[in-house]
Amino acid sequence: MMQYRTVILGMAILSLFAAIVVSPVAAQEVGVAQETFVAQESGPAAAAGADRQLPEGVVARVHGEDITEAQLLDRIARAYAHGERGREALAELVDDICVAREAARRGVTVTDDEVQAYIEKWDATVRKQSGGKATLESLYDTEEEKAEFVSAAHEFVLRQKMAREDFQSKPEEELSERYLKLWLASQRKKANVRYKNLDEGVMATVGGQNVLRQDLARRLRDKLPSELVAAVGNELVVTVASEHDARKSGVTITDELVDEAMRALRLRFADDPQVRGSGVTFDQYLRQSRGYGEDDLRTDRVFRARIALRRMKRDEISDDDVEQYWQDHLDAYGERVLVRQILVPASDGGAKFQQMSFHDASQVALGAKAEVLEAAGLHLPEKERPKTSMGALLTRIAKRLATNDKARHKAGEPMIFTRQPLQGEPALEKAAFDGPLGILQGPIRSSLGYHLLMVEERRPAPEFDDVAERIRDDLLSKRVNAYELACRADTENIIRSWEARSEAE
């Protein structure tokens, strides 16, 4: 769902307009996403009759068991409340409350005529920018989006009226984003907004008014793209289906199984280069990545259901299955190399995909190589060279060149390659498996861009017995994934308020 509730509503509309007019491909992709996750009332389930309808407050039914809206909101809050999306939604919610309180205190209102005048202004802007090919009305995909825009326009006009009064601006003047931000900051200060040292379940207080966790969850549900809401809902669907099938299979979740799963999480945490050496504790890691700590995770329904699902699927895997999987995927378990790399992403589409052209990427990669070699002091006598290893220097420069936080966490960190993921990239495969150890190689072109590669270690292909458990785990993950996909595609035993989508298509 598109959101316009910002202090620079007008700029948001122009951005949307630019996306549709300038980038037809992007607009088409948005359309596909909206069509994929439509309400079920318009899908096949509606044709099955009234028995397929869900009662109010219920968002899905799995093997006869209801999933409530409250459960969905709880999972949305767990997934997003503590991340960037959650912080943005909470700030937006707090600002709305501050504005509403101030408007009530002053007795300021906005008439329908004022809202309509603002809408007509932007309709004229859209017509002018498009040369008459588009109108504001044509930008709405649904009546719901139109109603949402009208509501956001009302909010924007209200903020403008009060801010103009405080800044003593002319009645017809539209204040800039900077002035509106300053005005909102003053309102938050006036309302004594607090985010810390609050009661359980309270996310913020505004002038003594509590902003509750469920309030934030509702805002997130309305603000998140529909596919993300569906993903959270499908997580609950898989949970209930797993519990149902576990009961049929006689699988129960014991404390020992939970302890085993927690040990696996701790090992993954210890091996994660993103947190290694950061000082982050395991409990903090869980709270940041899952929204709750270790004690809560142990009793979490979704976590325990996944343990049950993995136990069921593990019991189905025989030794013959493991050996056959080994035979079918020898390249995935063959010789391995430990490498560090700097990857400069590139695309034939260049700026169209917000990436460099291959030519520009090659120049950046050459500059990065020169920087690494100079930092290593290879031009100096050996006694005068820095003690910092080449690998550490490469990692430092790789992180500086990364274009986003997610890429930055992994950039330059040691990683293990087998031949399988390098198939189709002969130059990269040759450098990794045949190139010299400890020497910076490249730039090497691949379909992803240009690589600077340093091989730190090579390990021979292991014997089957040495990797049998890892193969069993990989096979288990594939079967768990297949089960989850089957749940998402199941319209016979599962009814939901979003259309099931089979990723197996």
Image: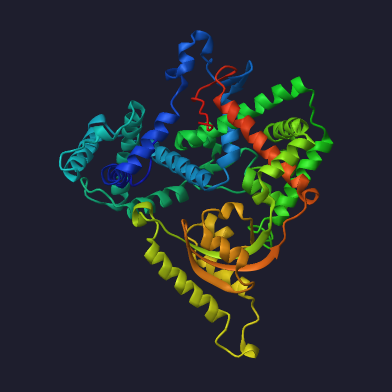
Residue 37 higher or lower than 52, as above or below:
below
Which residue is nearer to you in this view: 445 or 39?
445
**Residue 360 in view:** yes
Q: Quadrant of residue 92?
A: top left
Which residue is nearer to you in this view: 119 or 225?
225
Furthest-front residue in view?
A: 327
Residue 167 in picture, x, y percent from top left: 30, 52
Seen at 36% across and 34% down, the residue is: 31
Furthest-right residue in view?
A: 256
Residue 388 higher or lower than 33, as above or below:
below
Residue 371 higher or lower than 192, as above or below:
below
Q: Tally the numbered discs.
A: 0
Seen at 32% across and 50% down, the residue is: 166
Seen at 45% across and 74% down, the residue is: 367
The figure's colour scheme reads rainbow
Q: Seen in the image, is 364 located left or right of residue 268? A: left
Residue 480 in picture, x, y percent from top left: 66, 34
Q: Quadrant of residue 13?
A: top left
Residue 437 in picture, x, y percent from top left: 64, 72
Q: Seen in the image, is 22 located left or right of residue 452? A: left
Residue 190 in picture, x, y percent from top left: 45, 48
Which quadrant would the N terminus be assigned to in this image? top left
Q: Seen in the image, is 62 located left or right of residue 17? A: right
**Residue 159 in view:** no
Which residue is nearer to you in this view: 54 or 93?
54
